[in-house]
């Protein structure tokens, strides 16, 4: 391996930049999705305050495959945005700003979001009993 | 009071870019940090409530701890989201009048929704 100094193909630095840029856009996208989710939170809370009939309407809207898919997407967005938010806060402390480190923490955040989402839904299906 | 880092003219006109203010930056971090335990609490609670019926959920939110956490969650989330969406708006809406209108609309919507949530929590915790 005498020639490790030559540029690698694919050009890793450029590829890595792409990943960190995509993650940055994803932070914004998930933030907006979650902000829209506040409408659902408001609907849920006000329905709970209004009574059983209003609450039942929210449940019918959620307790179906499409509603489940939406909730699944929200949990994925929450875990990604939360983990990447911590990444941002750590950056604010001046830690992990190097390209290599940012790439690795980015991969970690992605994996965390994926694994946490899966574990959460396994927990819901196994222990929560799912929609009753 | 936290130092805002705003220039004098910015303080007078208070109409510069939201992200230029250290105050905005600080509040975004503050709410981000507050969101962490609150969102974790909410996600864990939601899992434990999955499949629960009306009475169960009401009893859950009726507890003092849970209603307190929910109030904190609502305040922190709406504040954080409002600051965040504001930054996004300012990145994409360049027309001055439109930007002002968007900002106004966003603020009014955030306050209206947050107050609805807080009153709903109050109603549930008072058990009426
Ligand atoms: C769970 C804990 C959370 C943490 C730790 C967190 C952290 C952060 C941080 C640090 C930023 C600033 C990023 C930057 O400087 O560019 C941010 C932006 C943002 N957050 Fe959160 N956040 C959390 C939850 C949420 C939730 C639940 C919502 C929506 C309801 C949300 C909506 C947003 C939005 C809209 C932005 C602006 C995105 C942008 O400027 O591109 N966040 N968040």
Image (cartoon, coloured by chain):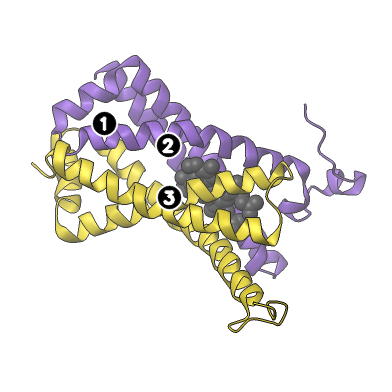
> Which label sits in the foreground, 1 or 2?
2
Chain identifier, yellow in the render:
A
Q: Secondary structure at mark 2?
A: helix
Q: Chain of mark 3?
A: A
Classify residue A101 by image quadrant: bottom right
What residue appears at the point 21 percent right and 21 percent down from the top-left corner? B59
Badge 1 or badge 3: first in the primary sequence: 1
Q: Position of residue B124 (x, y in %)?
A: 28, 24
Q: Badge 2 is on which residue?
A: B39
> Which label sits in the foreground, 1 or 3?
3
Cβ of mark 2 under 8 A from ligand 1: yes
User: As drawn, is B76 to the left or to the right of A90?
Assistant: left
Q: Which mark is residue B44?
A: none
What residue appears at the point 24 percent right and 18 percent down from the top-left corner? B127
Q: Badge 3 is on which residue?
A: A112
Q: Position of residue B106 (x, y in %)?
A: 55, 52
Gap between marks 1 and 3 measured at Cα: 35 Å
Identify the colour of chain B in the image: purple
Q: Chain of mark 2?
A: B
What residue appears at the point 57 percent right and 35 percent down from the top-left corner? B33
Q: In the depicted view, which residue is nearer to us: A14 or B114?
A: A14
Q: Which mark is residue A49?
A: 1
Q: Secondary structure at mark 3?
A: helix
- Compared with B68, B28 (above or below) is below
Extreme-left residue of the structure: A132
Q: Secondary structure at mark 1?
A: helix
User: As drawn, is A47 to the left or to the right of B109?
Assistant: left
Gap between marks 3 and 2 measured at Cα: 16 Å
Q: In the depicted view, which residue is nearer to us: A49 or B87?
A: B87
Q: Are marks 3 and 2 on the same chain?
A: no
């Amino acid at each position: 391996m005498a020639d490790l100094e030559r540029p690698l193909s694919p050009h890793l630095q450029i590829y890595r930049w792409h990943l960190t840029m995509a993650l940055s856009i994803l932070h914004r996208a998930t933030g907006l999705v979650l902000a829209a989710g506040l409408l659902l939170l408001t609907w849920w809370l006000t329905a709970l305050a209004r009574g059983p009939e209003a609450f039942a309407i929210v449940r019918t809207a959620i307790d179906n495959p499409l509603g489940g898919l939406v909730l699944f997407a929200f949990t994925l967005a929450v875990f990604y945005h939360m983990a990447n938010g911590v990444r941002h806060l750590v950056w604010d402390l001046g830690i992990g700003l190097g390209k290599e480190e940012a790439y690795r923490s980015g991969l970690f955040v992605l994996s965390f979001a994926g694994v946490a989402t899966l574990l959460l839904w396994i927990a819901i299906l196994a222990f929560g009993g799912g929609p009753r | 009071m936290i130092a805002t880092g705003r220039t004098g003219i910015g303080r007078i006109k208070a109409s510069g870019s939201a992200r230029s203010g250290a105050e905005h930056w600080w509040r975004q971090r503050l709410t981000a940090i507050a969101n962490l335990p609150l969102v974790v609490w909410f996600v864990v609670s939601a899992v434990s409530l999955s499949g629960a019926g009306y009475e169960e959920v009401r009893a859950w939110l009726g507890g003092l701890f849970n209603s307190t956490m929910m109030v904190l969650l609502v305040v922190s989330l709406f504040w954080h989201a409002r600051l965040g969406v504001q930054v996004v708006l300012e990145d994409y809406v360049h027309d001055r009048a439109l930007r002002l209108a968007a900002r106004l609309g966003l603020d009014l919507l955030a306050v209206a929704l947050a107050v609805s949530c807080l009153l709903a929590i109050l109603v549930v915790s008072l058990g009426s």
